Image (spheres, rainbow, N blue to C red):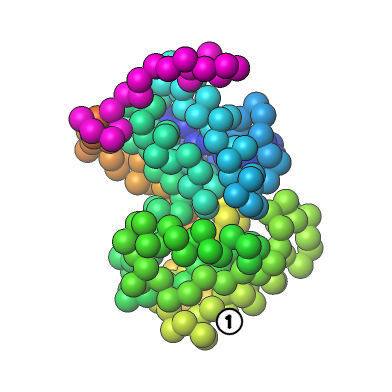
Amino acid sequence: MRIKVINPNTTASMTALIGECARAVAGPGVTVDAVSPRQGPAAIESHVDDALAVPGLLQEIADGESAGYDGYVIACFGDPGLKAARELARGPVVGIAEAGMRTASYLGRGFSVVTTLARTVGHAHDLTEEYGVARQCRGIHACEIPVLALETDPHARATILRACEEALALDGSDAIVLGCAGMADLCHDLSTALGVSVIDGVAAATATVEMLVRMRLRTGKLGEFAPHPRSEGVGLSVGLG
């Protein structure tokens, strides 16, 4: 089995971290390749970033289809381009926000999300509604650390831990979902410190894709996610046009 994990931003060091965390949960016989698009934003922190990341993400899906991958992970908590990716791919495509929140809903009555910037909280709330977990989501909390600063700020871990502690105290949650792929390597240390399950969406999405492929399940192709019709366009990527 081959799973392609796509970090929709172009920061190579974050892609390497995401790949390590995805491979750590992959089962025997599963190859996990972590990639970034050849062009796009260095970090995804706004609706504009989200939109700019999607063309490169979809090109990686198209390339993955040509290379014969069995399934895909979209490793950004906004789940950019998820529906379009499912339309392109034969196998399952899972976003880390959906996987992380659904996983947390199995572990108790409620969970909290701890994410990066406050400007992303509204979109995360929208996703809880779309994925049917709004009732389980007790709160979404921003620690105001920019995505790229997760790698460079020496106080980032302590700030995230404090935000998790405050979220648990305010929300009375049973679990924490980390709201950024760049936090993927923190879940085990945070879980030990907090005494609750801390879910990394990269790991959750990778395990979910593996499960779906092993069960021989895939996105339905009879309706909305049927192969997209070819259309005329200007300047479209060869793999998508």
Q: Is residue 125 visible?
A: yes
Image quadrant of residue 237? top right
The N terminus lies in quadrant: top left
In the rendered picture of this protein, how many numbered marks are placed on residues? Answer: 1
In the depicted view, which residue is nearer to us: 68 or 225? Answer: 225
Q: Please report the residue visible at 48 percent of the width from the left and 39 percent of the height from the top.
A: 81
Q: Please report the residue visible at 40 percent of the width from the left and 53 percent of the height from the top.
A: 98
The magenta segment: 222-241
- Is residue 110 one of those drawn in magenta? no
In the rendered structure, the answer to whether residue 206 lies left or right of residue 224 reads right
Residue that badge 1 annotates: 166
In the rendered structure, the answer to whether residue 222 lies left or right of residue 193 reads left
In the depicted view, which residue is nearer to us: 67 or 193? Answer: 67
In the rendered structure, the answer to whether residue 27 lies left or right of residue 20 reads left
Task: Check disc 1: other Cα within 10 Å, few if <14, some if 14-19, many if 20+.
Answer: some
Q: Please report the residue visible at 51 percent of the width from the left and 44 percent of the height from the top.
A: 80
Image quadrant of residue 117? bottom right
Q: Is residue 157 above or below residue 224?
A: below
Q: Amino acid at mark 1?
A: Glu
Instruction: Indicate the secondary structure of the residue bearing disc 1.
Output: helix
Q: Is residue 120 above or below residue 53?
A: below
Residue 157, how many percent across, how many down?
A: 68, 66
Q: Is residue 159 above or below residue 97?
A: below
Residue 188, how many percent across, how many down?
A: 53, 62
Q: Is residue 29 visible?
A: no
Magenta-colored segment: predominant secondary structure: loop
Residue 235, how many percent across, how many down?
A: 60, 17
In the rendered structure, the answer to whether residue 49 lies left or right of residue 31 reads right
Q: Please report the residue visible at 28 percent of the width from the left and 28 percent of the height from the top.
A: 226
Q: Is residue 36 above or below residue 95?
A: above
Residue 90, how many percent across, how many down?
A: 32, 26
